[in-house]
Image (cartoon, rainbow, N blue to C red):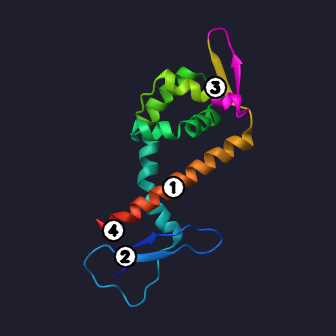
């Protein structure tokens, strides 16, 4: 059986040592006695490529509840990659464009105010709107990285569970 007929599933957390992994056949073929396992990069690419393609093509529909659960980190990321500061209405439009999420001002603005209150965002009042920018790069980066790690770990766990179905 070639490496194309195998799937490596990571089952443990990687923390300075190799993760617990198992190799599962994709079909009914027998397991080989020895084989060269696919590289970790190949595994990552096979899992992430379809998602990356959907994001790039603007075809990422995500349940509004999941977006809401990570709204602070998503808002920080959107503000960080904006060409300058941005305002709440523009962020809500971007949430809909990127994820198909239609969130109300009553959901988005309180999160922006919380991020401003804890010093992660800065707000500049303009004539008829407020413009937001990142005030604490390190705090924003840590918050986004933690959320990304947790979502990726959960996604890998769910993906590994597919073998049991």
Question: In the image, residue 101 lies at what x, y percent?
Answer: 42, 32
Which label's residue is closer to the chain start, 1 or 3? 3
Q: Which residue is mark 3?
A: 113
Which label's residue is closer to the chain start, 1 or 4? 1
- Graded by Cα atoms within 10 Å as few (under 14), some (14 to 19) or many (20 or more), the crowding at tag 2 reads few
Question: In the image, residue 112 lies at what x, y percent?
Answer: 61, 28
Question: Could you tell me how far apart the alpha carbons at marks 2 and 3 are, in whole angstroms?
Answer: 47 Å
Judged from the image, the secondary structure of the residue bearing numbered disc 1 is: helix
Label 2–label 4 contact, CB within 8 A: yes
Q: Which residue is mark 2?
A: 24
Question: Could you tell me how far apart the alpha carbons at marks 1 and 3 are, in whole angstroms?
Answer: 27 Å
Judged from the image, the secondary structure of the residue bearing numbered disc 4 is: helix
Question: In the image, residue 15 lies at what x, y percent?
Answer: 63, 68
Question: In the image, residue 11 lies at what x, y percent?
Answer: 47, 69
Q: Residue furthest top?
A: 127
Label 1–label 2 contact, CB within 8 A: no
Q: Residue furthest bottom?
A: 33
Question: Could you tell me how far apart the alpha carbons at marks 2 and 4 are, in whole angstroms?
Answer: 8 Å
Q: Which residue is mark 4?
A: 163
**Label 2 vs label 3, nearer the camera:** 3
Q: Which residues are magenta?
A: 113-128
- Graded by Cα atoms within 10 Å as few (under 14), some (14 to 19) or many (20 or more), the crowding at tag 3 reads some
Which residue is depicted at the point 48% across and 36% down?
68
Which label's residue is closer to the chain start, 2 or 4? 2
Q: Which residue is mark 1?
A: 152
Which label's residue is closer to the chain start, 2 or 3? 2
């Amino acid at each position: 059986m070639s490496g194309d007929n195998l799937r490596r599933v990571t089952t443990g957390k990687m923390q300075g040592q190799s993760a617990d992994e198992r190799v599962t056949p994709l079909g009914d073929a027998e397991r080989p006695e020895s084989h060269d396992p696919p590289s970790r990069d190949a595994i990552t690419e096979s899992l992430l490529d379809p998602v990356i393609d959907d994001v790039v093509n603007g075809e990422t529909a995500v349940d509004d509840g999941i977006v809401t659960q990570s709204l602070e980190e998503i808002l920080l990321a959107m503000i960080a990659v904006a060409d300058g500061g941005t305002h709440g209405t523009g962020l809500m439009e971007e949430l809909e464009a990127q994820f198909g999420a239609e969130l109300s001002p009553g959901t988005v603005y309180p999160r922006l105010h919380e991020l401003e209150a804890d010093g992660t965002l800065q707000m500049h009042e303009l004539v008829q709107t407020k413009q937001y920018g990142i005030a604490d790069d390190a705090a924003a980066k840590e918050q986004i990285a933690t959320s990304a790690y947790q979502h990726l770990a959960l996604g890998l766990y769910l993906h590994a569970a597919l073998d049991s179905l």
